[in-house]
């Protein structure tokens, strides 16, 4: 085996892990196209990948997971800190000793007869001061090929790492894909992740949720930066100035769509453009000029396929036209391409569904693609990818936007009074569940959309947000907002058109950041004057009266909400920062 580094901590860790899992051979991933091409070929020969139509989808492949392995498994995801209190009340916890013993027991000998792949990868542009290195040891070519899209892989990562011990250790073992033995464990104090018995993206592409959010959020706490579940987009105005926004939404709120939005025609004509820097994760640091800067640590999009189409997100669709790996979508046998629910109205008749069975979409009552089927697409494919995507210094952030899915409660948009109040606004994020998650309309609290991704006690995480704010001059700190695209009228219809028209709300947000637009002060924050939201071109769809209704703050509903927040805060047993308790008290008294 050709080792790609002499880093003693890497070699020692690998030696230990290889002794544990006992592969037949070891392959170091050097990042070359030549090596990746060979692995693709090998995966096609074994059936792990299926090569799609080279003319219509050049360099694209289809993969099907095991039927019992189709999504992240929050109930089997653990934060393994020395004491439970460090993980907090919202994380599953296991003592590190116990977790290592359990997982190493499962991992033991699990690579016998298999190949071990050593993937050096960088989260963030190689060599950027924001970036961090990781090494993932895996027995899955699918993982190698997905990591090669989602991160920067190869020897250059080791060259920058040198002999440093600051890298994240990640061990992935497919084992038998046994659900009852599936564990996704993070050890923040050890910079370590172990994932066993899964082959599904979010559980096994260890650079993504496990490192870039769970481990990185802990690192950010210790090193004075933030790792957030946020997209990054740039809005370019007709003068050519670009302002950047980071936005956090729980899963299933259209994050990828917002990150790549196409401006409404009236905006396009004036010269507005939207640029995508990232669709899922932001790493944020204070720059030399005192402003906050963000990078997207990823290099690709791991997007949900169903519902992605020419209308909802043409940029995402275009991103999947080459060099993409599709997981659990429909295979159209007639032309060897892919299909999913919501792509268009023409499901193929001669097809294979995500389970690998013959499927006729014109008559079948069953879905052909799994609702959580995915595309792994290179960011460089995206027609609206930002020119700053590779900027090692990141982009300056003007606004943070939090959002959720609330039928009645939250107005279309409101602005927090100040940074600390903004932390409160982020902490009270919640979403009402959709049919996809079982019961409809159940409120799930998801502070900063980080509930499943915060690698330490969420109360410490909030304190960290407050501490970061304290280091910023008020005029340089990003302004903080909350949006709700999902408000419904009495008949249950969505009141706001969403998609590209969301730019109208971002427009107001950026005007507020520049101190231009007006607002009314309410109990929950600053609300726009309806006249200040630009409805040009959608006057027939959204009346001023309807917009006013979307901006209303219903005190009775908010009083109930305040009690829900208090109940949630009580779970933290006195650890919620006093600034946030004060915001809750202020809300209660203003509503009284
Ligand atoms: C994701 C998620 O897959 O947040 O990005 O669930
Ligand atoms: Mn996500």
Image (cartoon, grey):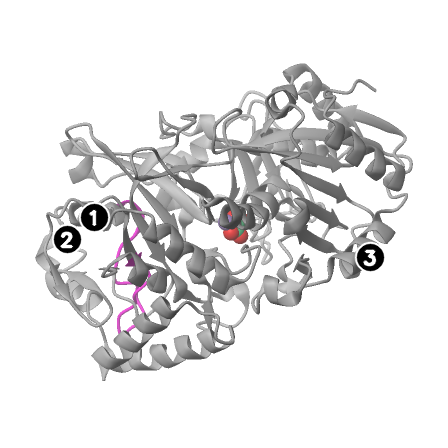
Tell me the SS state at disc 1. Answer: helix
Question: Could you tell whether 320 is left or right of 586 in the image?
Answer: right
For the residues labelled 1 and 2, say whether their Cβ atoms are less than 8 Å apart.
yes
What residue does disc 3 label? Answer: 102
For the residues labelled 3 and 1, say whether their Cβ atoms are less than 8 Å apart.
no
Gap in angstroms between the C-alphas marked 2 and 3:
56 Å
Q: Which badge, 3 or 1, is on the more N-terminal residue?
A: 3
Residue 189 x, y percent position in the rendering = 65, 50
Residue 171 x, y percent position in the rendering = 74, 42
Q: Choose between 492 and 555: the one closer to the eye.
A: 555
Task: Tell whether position 443 is magenta.
Answer: no
In the rendered structure, which segment of residues is drawn in magenta? 482-500
Gap in angstroms between the C-alphas marked 3 and 1:
52 Å
What residue does disc 1 label? Answer: 504
Q: Quadrant of residue 286?
A: top left
Quarter the N terminus occupies: top right
Gap in angstroms between the C-alphas marked 1 and 2:
6 Å
Q: Which badge, 2 or 3, is on the more N-terminal residue?
A: 3
What residue does disc 2 label? Answer: 533
At a point 36% along the width and 27% down the height, the residue shown is 388
By secondary structure, the bulk of the magenta-drawn segment is best described as loop
Tell me the SS state at disc 3. Answer: helix
Can the viewer see residue 484?
Answer: no
């Amino acid at each position: 085996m050709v080792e790609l580094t002499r880093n003693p901590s890497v070699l020692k860790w690998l030696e230990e892990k290889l002794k544990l899992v006992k592969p037949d051979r070891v392959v170091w991933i050097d990042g070359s196209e030549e090596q990746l091409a060979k692995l693709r070929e090998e995966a096609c020969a074994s059936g792990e990948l299926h090569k799609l139509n080279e003319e219509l989808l050049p360099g694209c492949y289809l993969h099907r997971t095991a039927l019992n392995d189709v999504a992240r498994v929050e109930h089997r995801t653990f934060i393994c800190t020395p004491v439970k209190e460090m993980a907090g009340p919202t994380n599953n916890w296991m003592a590190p000793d116990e977790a290592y013993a359990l997982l190493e027991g499962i991992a033991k000998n699990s690579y016998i007869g298999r190949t071990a792949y050593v993937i050096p990868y960088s989260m963030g542009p190689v060599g950027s001061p924001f970036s961090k290195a990781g090494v993932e040891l895996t027995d899955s070519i699918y993982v190698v090929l997905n990591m090669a899209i989602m991160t920067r892989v190869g020897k250059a990562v080791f060259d920058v790492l040198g002999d440093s011990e600051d890298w994240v250790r990640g061990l992935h073992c497919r084992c038998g894909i046994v659900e009852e033995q599936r564990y996704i464990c993070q050890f923040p104090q050890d910079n370590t992740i172990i994932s066993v018995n899964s082959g599904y993206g979010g559980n096994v592409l260890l650079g993504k949720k496990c490192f870039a959010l769970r481990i990185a959020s802990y690192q950010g706490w210790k090193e004075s930066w933030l790792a957030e579940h946020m997209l990054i987009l740039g809005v370019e105005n007709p003068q050519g100035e670009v302002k950047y926004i980071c936005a956090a939404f729980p899963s299933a709120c259209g994050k990828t769509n917002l990150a790549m939005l196409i401006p409404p025609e009236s905006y396009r004509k004036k010269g507005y453009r939207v640029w995508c820097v990232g669709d899922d994760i932001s790493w944020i640091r204070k720059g030399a000029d005192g402003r906050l800067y963000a990078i997207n640590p990823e290099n690709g999009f791991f997007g949900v396929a169903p519902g992605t189409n020419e209308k909802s997100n043409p940029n995402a669709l275009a991103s999947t036209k080459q060099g993409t790996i599709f997981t659990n979508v429909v295979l159209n046998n007639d032309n060897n391409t892919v299909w999913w629910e919501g792509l268009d109205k023409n499901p193929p008749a001669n097809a294979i569904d995500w389970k690998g069975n013959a499927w006729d979409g014109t008559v079948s009552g069953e879905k052909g693609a799994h609702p959580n089927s995915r595309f792994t697409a290179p960011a460089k494919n995206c027609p609206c990818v930002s020119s700053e995507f590779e900027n090692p210094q990141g982009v300056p952030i003007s606004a943070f936007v939090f959002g959720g899915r609330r039928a009645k409660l939250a107005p279309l948009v409101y602005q927090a009074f100040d940074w600390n109040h903004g932390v409160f606004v982020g902490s009270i994020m919640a979403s009402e569940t959709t049919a996809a998650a079982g019961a409809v309309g159940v409120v799930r609290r998801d502070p900063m959309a980080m509930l499943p991704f915060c690698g330490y006690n969420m109360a410490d995480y909030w304190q960290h947000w407050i501490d970061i704010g304290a280091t910023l001059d008020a005029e340089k700190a990003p302004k903080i907002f909350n949006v709700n695209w999902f408000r419904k009228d009495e008949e249950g219809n969505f009141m706001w058109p969403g998609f590209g028209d969301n730019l109208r709300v971002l427009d107001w947000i950026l005007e507020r950041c520049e101190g231009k637009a007006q607002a009314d002060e309410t109990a929950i924050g600053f609300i726009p004057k309806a006249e200040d939201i630009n409805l040009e071109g959608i006057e027939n769809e959204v009346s001023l009266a309807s917009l006013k209704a979307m901006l209303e703050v219903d005190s009775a509903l908010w009083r109930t909400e305040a009690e829900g927040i208090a109940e949630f805060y009580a779970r933290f047993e006195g650890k919620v920062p006093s600034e946030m308790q004060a915001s809750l008290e202020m809300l209660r008294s203003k509503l009284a």
